Image: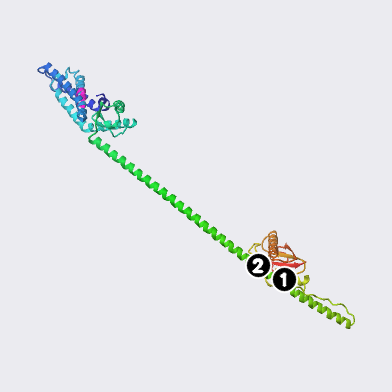
Amino acid sequence: MLYLVTHYWIWLAAAFVVGAITPLLADKFGWAADLENYWVSRVGVVLAVALVLVLAQLASGKAELLLEAGIGLVIAYVAGGLAGGIAPGLLPVRFEGWWVGLFATGLILAVFGITTLPKLEPDLRERVADVVKEAGADPLNFDVAGRDVLLPADLGSDKVRASLGEQILKVPGVRRVADVDELSGSALAAKTVAKLQAEAEAKAKAESAAKEAAAKEAAAKAAKDAAQKHAAAKVKADAEAKEAAAKAAAEAAAKEAAAKEAAAKAAAEAAAKQAAADEAAKKVADEAAKQAATKPAAAPAEIKTANATGALPSSPAQDCQGRVSALASAEKINFERRSAVIDKASQPLLDKLAAAIKQCPAVTIEVAGYTDGAGKKSANIALSKRRAEAVVASLTKVGIGSVKLVAEGYGSAKPIAANDTAEGRAQNRRIEFVVK
């Protein structure tokens, strides 16, 4: 009853107001009258109230809630009648009009039953479910009948149900906690649905775990296969590399043997030529001696002896200068733009120059680099010097014999053409060779 007073006071207040207005209306409209059998009526009312209270204790479910609400409204109505009857001096049982107010109270009970009563059980069920969940039990494994909470036998042991019942009794609105063998009705349906949902979720989780395990296994297998393929490819690549290296070594050995054979053949030919040259020189010398014996003495003539290849000895410095200058003038050593990197197309010319320089005596040749007049003087000098050094490095790499090469850079100095035209600037960008 206290639960109804604290949570649904608006309905009790309405009944109280009806009770307070009723004696005032009875006094105004002359409804007041002494009733026959005064005390019998009062005893009947008391007995009726007691009977209603007994029925409220025996009833359960919504009937119990409706009886409790009816008792509460009647008490509020009587309290209002006592308060309202003070002024006219009318008690609720001393006038006939109190039945009118009681009828109005019945209408209030009907409205309560339509609007508020259906909300009582769901509200109580929700608050009890929170307590059951906090206790670690299934929040769907119980039922609510009116303000009574029913706990099934499968909720746990007697001790567990007793402990949980004590906690549930502390929930405002719970009248009592009862044990039942099993749930029925909507509670059983909700429990069954929850169980099916839990089983479905467990099945889905198991299937998901199985799929995840299968995916991991497939990924591991794919990684293993990839590793095996990679290892096989590496073994194959290593074998091919070894085979290629062995083939290259064999080819190199064959080339080296061929080169040695060619060198030996060339040496034999050179020795033969040298022997022939020596014999020819000796023959010339014998003839000259004979002529000297038969002719008057004359100035001795210079005798030039052929070398092993049958050619005359190397030219003097002037002839060397002429040959090198002729090659440098006939063709031009080209470089990449604003760079000291020699153009690959100029390599044949460098080979020719190296061959010509190789025939020179042991002289020093200055390799002079020149640029056009564009740009800063210091930058041109540095660029011409780097280009001259690149030519020296290239010729030395090819082979120049005993000749010494010296690189110098003169920038835009000593132009051989005007820098006004592209053609003149191209002529000024050159490499010259000066035999010292």
Residue 62, image x, y percentages:
21, 30
Q: Which residue bears the numbered disc 2?
A: 257
Disc 2 secondary structure class? helix
Residue 160, image x, y percentages:
31, 28
On the image, which quarter does residue 152 sit in? top left
Which of the numbered marks, if any, corresponds to residue 407?
none
The dominant secondary structure in magenta is helix
Left or right of 131 on screen, residue 249: right
Quadrant location, the C terminus: bottom right
* Residue 332 shows in this picture: no
Q: Residues within 10 Å of mark 2 (few under 14, many from 20)?
A: few
Disc 1 secondary structure class? helix
Q: Residues within 10 Å of mark 1 (few under 14, many from 20)?
A: few
- Is 74 one of the magenta-colored residues? yes
Query: Which is more N-terminal, label 2 or label 1?
Result: 2
| In-front residue for pair 86/307 | 307
User: Range of the magenta residues?
Assistant: 69-76
* Residue 57 shows in this picture: yes
What coloring was used for the rendering?
rainbow
On the image, which quarter does residue 163 sit in? top left
Outermost residue on the bottom side: it is: 294
Residue 131 versus residue 209 in the image, above or below: above
| In-front residue for pair 429/255 | 255
Residue 184, image x, y percentages:
23, 34
Measuring 53% from the left and 59% from the top, which residue is drawn there? 237
Q: Tag 1: residue type?
A: Ala
| Number of marks drawn | 2
- Is 196 one of the magenta-colored residues? no
Left or right of 275 on screen, residue 390: left
Q: Which residue bears the numbered disc 1?
A: 267
The answer to whether mark 1 and mark 2 are in CB contact below 8 A is: no
